[in-house]
Image (cartoon, helix red, strand yellow):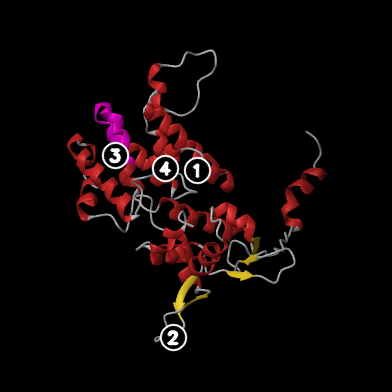
């Protein structure tokens, strides 16, 4: 399948694998020093907390030193740094990294200096935000865009300004449609919409590994909600029609198991983690008589 054959040829394939394992509260560890195989093990509680808490909103491990200096100083509001921010967005698209804080700083510069707004960079920021769902990155970015570019339709009683029909606004509308489908877990409809118009592919063309990153994110969310899932359903949600490619993704990237002996067809078994483990909770509440002391005392008091 030409459409999916490039998934496993990416130089960042191992990085995606490690990312998925950390998000699903599982870690990869070598079976032995000599072995190259990877196996899943449940990490210690301290390691779990470290991986699930994440970094502060304004921090990014892959942020260059010169960008850190700009963001921590007054130059973040200097229009002359716009080109530096735009180059950094290009770098993020190429390196598969994401720095939400820096991207929002660039959109804030556009907000203060509308004449500097670069449509292609803006759509690239929105496309990158899609690869980190579910997160507020997309909605935060959308909130900083000019009012005329907002994708929400006006009421029928209001006239639509000419600027609303521009290619830039149409691009934002299409990306927002994709974000809505991802956030609402309509994964099959997301891929159906994405493949229905070549404009979608053009909008994410600058984002290296866009489809791979979205698949990893979908797999993370599936791992939080399921212990077992039909291979046919998962194939639709990941847009992997080839059974061989699907099984390779499930086993090599996700670390899940493929059960071909199930009565209802092939079933994907997902290891237990903090999110998909069903645990009963027993809640008890102790109410002492002293807690009602005031009410009881008032019951015996004579009215004034």
Q: What secondary structure is found at the residue carrying circle 3?
A: helix
Cα distance, mark 3 to mark 2?
Answer: 46 Å
Viewer-proximal residue, 152 or 135? 152
Cα distance, mark 1 to mark 2?
Answer: 43 Å
Where 195 sits versus 222, above or below? above
Viewer-proximal residue, 218 or 113? 218
The segment highlighted magenta reads 104-121
Cα distance, mark 1 to mark 4?
Answer: 8 Å
Residue 16 in the image: x percent, y percent?
A: 42, 62
Q: Which mark is residue 195?
A: 1
Where 109 sits versus 16, above or below? above
Q: Which residue is mark 4?
A: 201
* Among the two numbered marks 3 and 2 on one chain, the one whose residue lies closer to the N terminus: 2
| Image quadrant in which you'd find residue 129 | top left
* Among the two numbered marks 1 and 4 on one chain, the one whose residue lies closer to the N terminus: 1
Viewer-proximal residue, 8 or 217? 8
Answer yes or no: is residue 276 visible: yes
Question: Which dot, 3 or 1, sits closer to the camera?
Answer: 1
* Among the two numbered marks 4 and 2 on one chain, the one whose residue lies closer to the N terminus: 2
* Residue 119 covered by magenta stretch: yes
| Left or right of 266 in this view: 224 | left
Residue 230 in the image: x percent, y percent?
A: 66, 60
Q: Which residue does the image show at 66% across and 70% down from the upper left?
A: 260
Cα distance, mark 4 to mark 3?
Answer: 24 Å
Q: What secondary structure is found at the residue carrying circle 4?
A: helix
Viewer-proximal residue, 139 or 177? 177
Q: Which mark is residue 32?
A: 2
Q: Which residue is mark 3?
A: 106
- What secondary structure is the stretch in magenta mostly built from? helix
């Amino acid at each position: 399948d030409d459409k999916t054959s490039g998934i496993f040829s990416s130089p960042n394939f191992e990085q995606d694998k490690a990312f998925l394992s950390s998000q699903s509260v599982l870690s990869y560890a070598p079976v032995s020093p000599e072995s190259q195989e990877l196996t899943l093990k449940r990490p210690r509680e301290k390691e779990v907390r470290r991986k699930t808490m994440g970094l502060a909103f304004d921090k990014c491990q892959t942020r260059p030193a010169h960008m850190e200096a700009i963001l921590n100083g007054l130059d973040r509001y200097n229009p002359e740094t716009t080109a530096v921010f735009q180059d950094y967005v290009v770098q993020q698209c190429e390196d598969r990294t994401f720095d939400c804080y820096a991207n929002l700083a660039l959109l804030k510069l556009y907000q203060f200096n509308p004449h500097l707004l670069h449509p292609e960079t803006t759509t690239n920021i929105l496309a990158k935000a899609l690869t980190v769902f579910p997160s507020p990155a997309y909605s935060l970015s959308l909130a900083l865009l000019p009012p005329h570019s907002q994708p929400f339709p006006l009421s029928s009683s209001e006239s639509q300004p000419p600027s609303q029909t521009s290619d830039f606004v149409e691009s934002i509308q299409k990306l927002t449609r994709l974000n809505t489908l991802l956030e609402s877990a309509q994964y099959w409809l997301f891929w159906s919409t994405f493949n229905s118009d070549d404009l979608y592919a053009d909008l994410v063309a600058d984002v290296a590994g866009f489809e791979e990153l979205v698949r990893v994110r979908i797999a993370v969310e599936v791992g939080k909600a399921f212990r077992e899932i039909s291979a046919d359903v998962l194939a639709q949600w990941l847009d992997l029609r080839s059974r061989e490619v699907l099984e390779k993704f499930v086993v090599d990237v996700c670390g899940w198991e493929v059960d071909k002996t199930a009565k209802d067809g092939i079933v994907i078994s997902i290891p237990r983690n903090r999110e998909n483990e069903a645990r009963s909770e027993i809640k008890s509440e102790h109410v002492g008589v002293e807690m009602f002391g005031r009410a009881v005392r008032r019951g015996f008091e004579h009215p004034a």
